[in-house]
Amino acid sequence: MRAAQITEGSKAPEFTSVLKPSQPDASSDLVQLKVLATGLHRLVRSRASGKHYTSAATQKIPGVDGAGETSDGQKVFFLCFKEGGSFAEYINVPRKNTWPLPSGLDPIKAAGLVNPALSSWMALTARCDRLPEHFSVLIMGATSASGRLAVPLARSLGATRVIGCARNEEALKSMDLDDHVVLQDPVTSTDFSKLGNVDIVLDYVYGPVVVHLFKSLKPTGRVQYVHIGSLAAYGDPSAVEVSLPGSILRGMDLTVRGSGMGSWDLRDVGKAMDRLLQSLLNIGEAAIGVKKLEEVETAWNQVGDRLVFVP
């Protein structure tokens, strides 16, 4: 079968031919899927380069998820985070890591959006305690692909006030936000004074702005902060370091958590996946580029739209 394969020293996987996985027998907990679409997420690139904390040297075919079809024609979404290998025509995955695609959910949309959607979905459903009724949420890095998806997903979980924070004010104004804060340079000059009470903070940025935010908050109740990503580090690797004064922890009802593989596992994802897939039906058109798998070498480092490959 055809697949993309990681080779040592290459800047992008190579399109090549590899052995098709054996068809699992009926008693196996594995199921063979024909891959319909698989996403080139930031996570996929990072794991392939060996720079992600979950990278595995034994995984030669990249990919962590996708939409596939069983031998009897059922379309499913699948995760292969531990196994890797979705950048291929066929893949064997544990049955427990497959979920039926809801009627009307396009496989390409599922392959392109589930991964970035999981970041906020798992942060809210697995890393926050008892979301308050009609909660307010601040999304740091709101104009990123994952940040944009966090807006409608937070609303689907009950948020009635969604505030976005990013550098691009025009982009913020174009989003379905109740308010926005423009991230300044230096970040310590960012004006968070109009935030008011915030129940949840979803942070894709991290770095010194987090400390500035905590110092600026004037909550009337508990604040749940969840670290998801470190966009600040792409411009300044030192920005992943945070020095948090003890006075902040003593001065408000604040919980600080992270969200990612390790803070939750695939069992938690499994509990959340059906509802997440249903929620994606309510998300409008998304900018998703589509490439054939044989274009992987030239498209691997492409910037811009979220990219999905089809065999």
Image: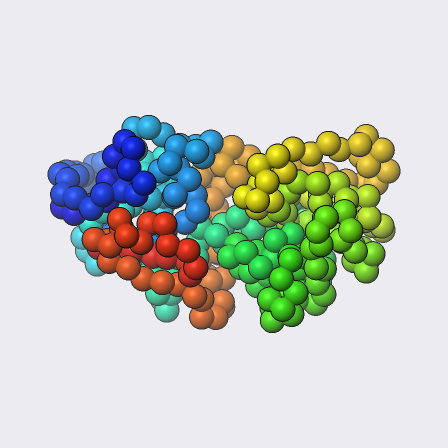
Residue 273 percent across, percent down from the top left: 45, 51
Looking at the image, can residue 67 be seen? no
Residue 233 percent across, percent down from the top left: 57, 41
Q: Residue at x 76, y 47 (%)?
A: 188
Looking at the image, can residue 293 be seen? yes
The image quadrant of residue 193 is bottom right
Q: Residue at x 61, y 57 (%)?
A: 142
Q: Residue at x 45, y 70 (%)?
A: 285
Residue 120 percent across, percent down from the top left: 56, 51
Question: From this viewpoint, which residue is outermost toward the top?
Answer: 57
Along the line of sight, the residue nearer the viewer: 17 or 24 = 17
Q: Residue at x 58, y 59 (%)?
A: 143
The image quadrant of residue 225 is top right
Residue 159 percent across, percent down from the top left: 67, 60
Left or right: where does residue 264 sit relative to residue 101?
right
Colouring of the image: rainbow
How many numbered marks have been drawn onto this rendered protein structure?
0
Along the line of sight, the residue nearer the viewer: 226 or 70 = 226
The image quadrant of residue 137 is bottom right
Left or right: where does residue 139 sit relative to residue 41?
right
Q: Quadrant of the C terminus?
A: bottom left
